Image (cartoon, grey):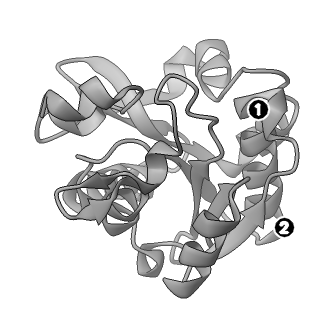
Amino acid sequence: MEIKVALVLMASGAGRRFGANKLLRTVDGLPLVRRVMAACPPELFAPALVVSRYPEILSLAEELGYTPVFNGGAEEGISATVRLGAAAAEQAGADGALFAVADQPWLTRASVERVLAAFAARPDTIPALSWQGKKGNPCLFPSEFFPELSALAGDTGGGAVIKAHPDRLVLVEADSAAELLDVDTPADLAQN
């Protein structure tokens, strides 16, 4: 039996520290969000969801073969995005959901595929991309955690679920430290 994993690409952040919609900022010739989409192509997932408050991101997602999910509650914090993604993954009958952030432009498809392979080998675990033993994103949650993810509130993400179940976490080493870096300010782009 093939394992069915949903993608929840979280693209709802306000980008206050960046001063503009950072997800559309060009990094090495591509908008930041497109770089993350390239690392998480829709053909690896069922379904491949992009959760965002931004119409331009949702339109781009649809054009590229993703299922757009509008996040009308983004002001509440990351939990609104996580809840929408967990609900959609559960509705699709997914065995698990990979939660990825849309502001990690140096993430690679190879690392995403290693996280998926770790889950396929041990579907009772929570594989997370890491660097030198430090957990990062993306993280893949088995469907048994969808109810806990759906109960999150405020600016609390999946890390709270991992803290409640540390024995289930499996670290999957990235190819480089840069893969785990997220972009919060224009200076973050200049560092790489």
Q: Position of residue 165 (x, y in %)?
A: 62, 19
* Looking at the image, residue 67 lies above or below residue 188: below
Q: Position of residue 81 (x, y in %)?
A: 73, 44
Q: Secondary structure at mark 2?
A: helix
Asked whether the viewer can see residue 106, the reply is yes
Q: Position of residue 3 (x, y in %)?
A: 53, 69
* Looking at the image, residue 51 lies above or below residue 146: below
Amino acid type of the residue that numbered disc 2 sits on in the rendered structure: Gln
Q: Is residue 92 left or right of residue 125?
A: right
Of circles 1 and 2, the one toward us is 1
Q: Position of residue 176 (x, y in %)?
A: 11, 35
- The span from disc 1 to disc 2 (Cα, nearest Å) is 18 Å
Q: Is residue 174 left or right of residue 76?
A: left
Q: Which residue is drawn at the image coordinates 55% and 33% (left, top)?
A: 15
Which image quadrant for residue 58? bottom right
Q: Secondary structure at mark 1?
A: helix
Say which of 98 and 124 sits in front: 98
Which image quadrant for residue 50? bottom right
The tag earlier along the polypeptide, 1 or 2, is 1
Say which of 108 and 135 sits in front: 108
Residue to which mark 2 is pinned: 91
Which quadrant of the rendered structure holds the N terminus?
bottom right
Number of other residues with Cα within 10 Å of mark 2, as a class: few under 14, some 14 to 19, many 20 or more: few
Q: Which residue is drawn at the image coordinates 36% and 53% (left, top)?
A: 32
Amino acid type of the residue that numbered disc 1 sits on in the rendered structure: Ser
Res. 95 mark: none
Q: Is residue 148 left or right of residue 180?
A: right
* Looking at the image, residue 190 lies above or below residue 123: above
Q: Which residue is drawn at the image coordinates 64% and 35% (left, top)?
A: 14
Residue to which mark 1 is pinned: 79
Which image quadrant for residue 170? top left
